[in-house]
């Protein structure tokens, strides 16, 4: 996707809407699995073909395709995966599978094959997804504050932990902390009520704009505009940005705007 940075909660909400528009209009007519290595659990084609999707849900980085009966299809797109509406015979680079329905054909592509599809009984979904915290798109400030202040880990580590807050990735967590002027190494337990409120406001603003665009824009005024630069500078103050190791990740941050 040229000129943008992926934001999992943002682009996945767009993918959820695409699947809902395409798959819920009538029975699935066919499934093509180009790469069997991305399909796990039960028989993917037999689970879908001839059945009408009743709903498509998103929680964090996971998409759930609901069907009549006990089984669900879970989709995870990893870091490089995506979904696209295509003509039936149109080739898609790095395609892994496609689903054919009266509303159209959706192909899943994934360059690094880090995601996949799982067929599981609905009650067993957590065995695949692992424990998930509240979804970032709908969290209230009080809940956000309780989660971030409950331990002594750095904010960056907490925000990308899907068991704490589901849906944020490396890029989006950097954008959020920069917008809220918070050092990514800051311990969550030290946040004040005002800082939690500011973090919640910025989270809603960033996600609202990113969902509307389908990605985090790399336009002026966004930290993401500097991610690909070899000499990134803060869009707000002009200081040189730094990349700091935090809990096994690297955080892009402004040492002036986000001073500890």
Image (cartoon, helix red, strand yellow):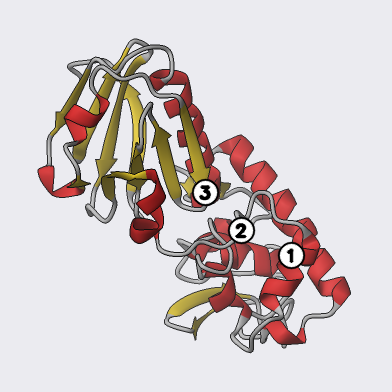
Please tell me which of labels 1 and 2 falls first in the chain.
2
Q: Is residue 140 left or right of residue 62?
A: right
Disc 2 target residue: 134
Mark 2 or mark 3, which is nearer the start of the sequence? 3
**Residue 89 in view in this figure:** yes
Determine which residue is flagged by label 3.
59
Which of 59/10 is in front? 59
Residue at x-position 33% and y-position 57%: 128
What distance separates the C-alpha of mark 3 from that of mark 2? 8 Å
Q: From the image, tell me which residue sits under label 1.
A: 143
Q: Do the residues labelled 3 and 2 touch (CB within 8 Å)?
A: no
Query: Could you say whether the residue bearing mark 3 is in a helix, strand or loop?
Result: strand
Would you identify the image quadrant in which residue 92 lies? top left
Residue 47 at x, y percent in the picture: 24, 30
Between marks 1 and 2, how big is the CA–CA gap? Answer: 9 Å
CB under 8 Å between callouts 1 and 3? no
- Asked if residue 69 lies left or right of residue 174, the reply is left
Q: In this view, does 114 lie to the left or right of 151?
A: left
Closer to the camera, 66 or 167?
66
Q: Which mark is residue 238?
A: none
Cβ–Cβ under 8 Å for marks 1 and 2: yes
């Amino acid at each position: 996707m040229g000129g943008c940075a992926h934001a999992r909660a943002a682009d996945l909400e767009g993918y959820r809407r695409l699947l809902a528009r395409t798959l819920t209009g009538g029975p699935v007519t066919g499934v093509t699995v180009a790469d069997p290595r991305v399909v796990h659990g039960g028989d993917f084609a037999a689970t879908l073909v001839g059945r009408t999707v009743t709903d498509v849900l998103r929680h964090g980085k996971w998409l759930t395709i609901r069907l009549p009966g006990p089984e669900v299809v879970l989709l995870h797109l990893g870091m490089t995966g995506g979904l696209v509406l295509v003509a039936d015979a149109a080739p898609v680079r790095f395609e892994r599978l496609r689903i054919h329905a009266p509303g159209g054909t959706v192909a899943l592509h994934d360059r690094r094959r880090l995601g996949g599809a799982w067929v599981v009984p609905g009650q067993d979904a957590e065995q695949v997804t692992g424990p998930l915290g509240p979804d970032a798109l709908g969290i209230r400030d009080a809940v956000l504050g309780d989660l971030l202040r409950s331990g002594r880990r750095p904010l960056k580590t907490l925000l990308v932990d899907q068991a704490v807050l589901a849906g944020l990735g490396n890029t989006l967590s950097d954008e959020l902390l920069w917008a809220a002027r918070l050092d990514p190494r800051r311990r969550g337990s030290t946040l004040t009520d005002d800082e939690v409120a500011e973090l919640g406001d910025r989270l809603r603003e960033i996600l609202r704009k990113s969902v509307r665009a389908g990605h985090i824009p790399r336009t002026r005024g966004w930290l993401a505009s500097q991610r690909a630069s070899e000499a990134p500078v803060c869009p707000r103050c002009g200081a040189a940005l730094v990349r700091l190791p935090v809990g096994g990740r690297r955080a892009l941050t402004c040492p002036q705007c986000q001073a500890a």
